[in-house]
Amino acid sequence: MANQTSKRKSQQRQAILQLVIMAAILVCVNIIAAKFHYGLDLTTEKRFTLSAPTKKLLKKMDDVAVVTVYLKGSFPTGFQRLAEATRERLQSFKDVSGNKIIFKFTDPFEGKTEEEKGPIYQELSKKGIEPINIKRKTEEEGYNEKYIFPYALVQYKGKEISVRLLENNVGYDEYQNLTASETLLEFKFASAIHKLDEPAPADVAYIVGHGETLGWPTYDLLMTLSRKYNVDTFDMASNYFIPRYYKAIIINKPTLPFEDKEKFKIDQYVMNGGKVLWAIDQLYTPMDSLNNGSQAFVATDYGLGLDDLLFKWGVRINTDIVEDMQCLPLPIIVGQQGDKPQMDLRPWIYFPLFMPTSDHPIVKNLNVIMSRFANSIDTIAVPDVNKTILIQSSQYSRTEQYPVRVSLGMLKYPFTPDMFKKPYRPTAVLLEGKFKSIFQNRLAPQFLQVLKDSLKQTYKEQSDSSTSMIVISDGDLMENDFTQQYGPMEMGYWRFTRTRYSNKEFVLNCMDYLTDNSGLLEARAKDQVIRMLDAKRVTKEKVKWRVINIGLPILIILVFASAYIFFRKRRYEKA
């Protein structure tokens, strides 16, 4: 009897010891799992794998970054999915950075009264965080409205920047916009950390002195650039050369001819490794004259004198106008109702909409870009210079050569695809490589000596290292609309349809590519693959997959439990 009691106590001690060991193993596994994460990216496009430049950035972090995500609470399914995708992406950042990323999700209005929400709105608005209004259906109140903030605030090294999480691309449905938003999360967060990590913003120059656009039409452009760069307005006519400390210069819609001395300054800036963003209109198209009662105008040549410079470097902007069936609508009077005119929106082929199709990171995953009176571009074979077409017209486009007569009467007649037989006309080109000076064998020895002795500048016939420039054949692409009632609007905003196009993102991507060597734009080039379900197969096989998804896990647990009970019973029966 004593032996049986002793044996029973021994078995109890062994059972308790096994439970303690199992509990300790589970605790250790959970601690290790909480500290180390690893996942397999089984997608073909490697959507969930961080790019090499992003990993390099995160591993170099020497301080802790705090990310506050304002997506917490009761949301529609789409926003819940975006919140979960944001959590997973930030967790992958945290793993690579060595826990130097701290993130939290918060609802800025949680527990706040209506009076307390006002100051919160203002505080978030100052940080560039704006709410969106969504309507949702509830059992208690039916449909109600709720303001949510699809943004994150990144704080790093005493600075902070807001990140917009939700994309709102023209022509995309909700699912496509969510997919695009998830794809760009890596790029947005990595870019924010990279910007906050820079000791000082890069210096860029907005060139003036040749009738370039300045004032209200460039308000949004200069304000947007000033958030990322130190922006100067630089008058070439009153300076002997363009300083090399400018990472890039912007030449936006000049209207006065360039003399050789100004072209020489641009030429030598490029030869010394400078980057240029060109936005050039070859033809004068006074659209305002149509608003003042005139029914037509004839486009005239600005005569800028830049053709030889650009031709030497690999492009030619033609003196024509691109006409495209994929275009913006323009309001036109179609009748009279009493004292009020009846307005209708008609397609205006002179204002094309460009859908980027290139795989280059500048435009990959970018939505439609609006344009006004764009010219076509021809590329020229130049040694050591690579050319990449960034945007181009649609399949149903054509060009009209100078002189061009533009008339509102065209709005009264429908267009057919067979009238547009010059498809895919380039309107923005990236040039990369070693450029050669257009002043080779053209400068007198006396001038070169004065240049060296007085200005301490050495003439270069070719750039020592590879540099780059972007040529856009539309001087209106970077402008914003403005009215007396609302003031300046955003770049790419078309007020007649209240649609926002991707002009601002395109310009910022161009400037990032020209000024930043980190390679983070690579994260933008990930493919957006939307895999659609076969509706017929879903209906036919839904019961089978429900059984597999719900019943199979339960069956596996029962099998393991039965095996455990069986072997445990046999063990104690032998004992």
Image (cartoon, grey):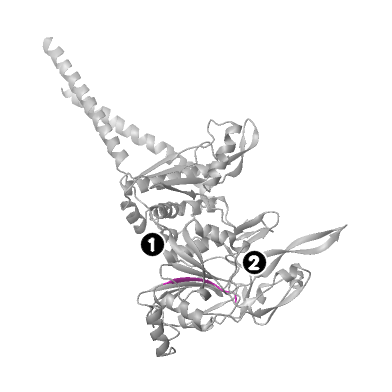
Residue at (57, 38) in percent of width and height:
119
Residue 91 shown in magenta: no
- Mark 2 and mark 1 in contact? Answer it, CB < 8 Å: no
| Residue 379 visible to the viewer | no
Please state if 423 lies on the left or on the right of 406 as rendered. left
Judging depth in this view, the residue of 341 and 172 nearest the camera is: 341
Figure quadrant of the N terminus:
top left
* Nearer the camera: disc 2 or disc 1: 1
Q: Residues within 10 Å of mark 2 (few under 14, many from 20)?
A: many
For residue 327, the mark is 2
Judging depth in this view, the residue of 504 and 181 nearest the camera is: 504
| Residue 401 visible to the viewer | yes
* Residue 423, quarter of picture: bottom right
For residue 519, the mark is 1
In primary-sequence order, the first of circles 2 and 1 is 2
Question: Which region is colored magenta?
Answer: 274-281
> Is the residue 2 above or below the residue 503 in the image?
above
- The CA span between labels 2 and 1 is 33 Å
Residue at (43, 58) in percent of width and height:
201
* Residue 411, quarter of picture: bottom right
